[in-house]
Image (cartoon, helix red, strand yellow):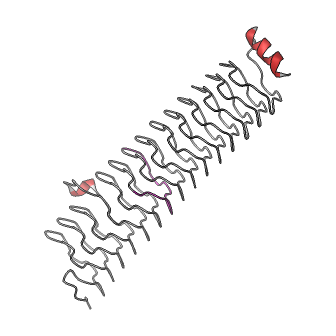
Amino acid sequence: MNVEELIWRYSQGDRDFSRLDLQRADLIQVNLSEANLSRTALDWANLSGADLSRANLNRADLINARLISAKLFAADLTGANLSNADLSWVNLEEATLISADLSGANLKQTNLSYTDLRSANLSNANLSGAILSGAILSRVDLSGANLSGVDLSGANLSRADLSGADLREADLTNANLYKADLSESKLQNIDFQEAFLQGANFSRSNLKGANLTGAILREVNLSLVTLSEFNLRAITFASEIDLSSANLKGANLKGAILRHANLGYGLLNKTHLSDSILRGANLIDASLRGGDLRNANFRNSNISDINLTEATMPDGSRHP
C-alpha cells in the first residue's frame, strides 16, 4: 500500500493498517490518530508533525524514523523499536512505552510526563530538556543517557540503570530511586530533596554540590564518590538524612555539612572530612580508619566505638 492509498482509506474510516511495509514513507503532518499501526514497518519514515494520538504502534518498527513535533498523546508503543529515531519536541504524554527500544534516540524537549516506560531501553538517548514528571521509569535502561537539567520530580526510577548518565542539575525531588544504579554518573548540583535512595549504587559518581536534604540513603554504595560541597543544609532531625551502614570509602566530603546525619556503622576509611560539620551526628561504630578529620566539627556528636586508626585528627595530630 502506498501513502496516497493509506491516506484515502483513513479518510473513508478505515483504521487498520497493521503489518504494512511503510519504510521510508513520507507521512509529514498526516492525521492517523487512533489508527492501528501495530507491527508496521516505518523504518526511516518521516512522520514529522503527524497526529498519532491514541494510535496503536505496538511492536512497530520506527528505527531511524523522524517524528519531530509529532503528536503521540496516549499512543501505545509497547515493544516498539525507536532506536536512533528523532523524537524531539514530540508530545508523548500518557503514552505507553513498556519495553520499547529508544536507544540512541533524540528526545530533546520531548513531553514524556506520565508515560509508562517500564523496562524500556533508553541507553545513550538524548533527553535534555525533556519533561518526565510523573513518568514510570522502573527498571528502565538509561545508561549513558543525557538527562542534564531534566525534571524528574516524583518519577519512579526504582531499579533503573542510570550508570554513566549525565544528570547534572536535574530535579529528582521526591523521586523513587530504590536500588537504582547511578555508578559513574554525573550528578553535580542535582536536587535529591526528599528522594528515596535506599539501596542505590553511587559508586564512582560525582555528587559535587548535590542537595540531599531530607533524602533517605539507607544501605547505599558511595564508594569512591566525589562529594565535595555536598549540600545537606537545613537538616533538623537525624532520621532525615540516613547514611547508616553506607560505604563512603575514599569519598571526598571536605567541607560537607552533615549536621545530625546518621553515619552509624558506616565505612569511611580514608574519607576526606576536613573542614566538615558533623555537629550532632551519629557515628556509633563507624570506621574512620586513615581518614582526614582536620578542622572537622564533631560537637555533640555520638562517636562511641569508632575506629580512628591512622586517622588525622581535627587538631592535625595522627592517631596511632
Residue drawn at x 38%, y 71% as measured from the top left: 251
The one nearer the camera, 118 or 14, is 14
The one nearer the camera, 39 or 284, is 39
Q: Quadrant of residue 154?
A: top left
The one nearer the camera, 224 or 283, is 224
Taking 30 as reference, is 163 left or right?
A: left
Residue drawn at x 68%, y 22% as measured from the top left: 29
Could you tell me which quadrant the C terminus lies in? bottom left
- Image: magenta residue range: 174-188
Task: List x then y, in percent, for residue 110.
Answer: 55, 36
Q: Magenta residues: mostly which secondary structure?
A: loop
Q: Is 24 drawn above or below residue 255 in the view shown?
A: above
Could you tell me which quadrant the N terminus lies in? top right
Q: Is residue 146 magenta?
A: no
Taking 306 as reference, is 136 left or right?
A: right
Residue farthest to the top, as pictured: 12
Q: Is residue 176 magenta?
A: yes
Q: Quadrant of residue 315?
A: bottom left
Residue drawn at x 48%, y 38% as measured from the top left: 132
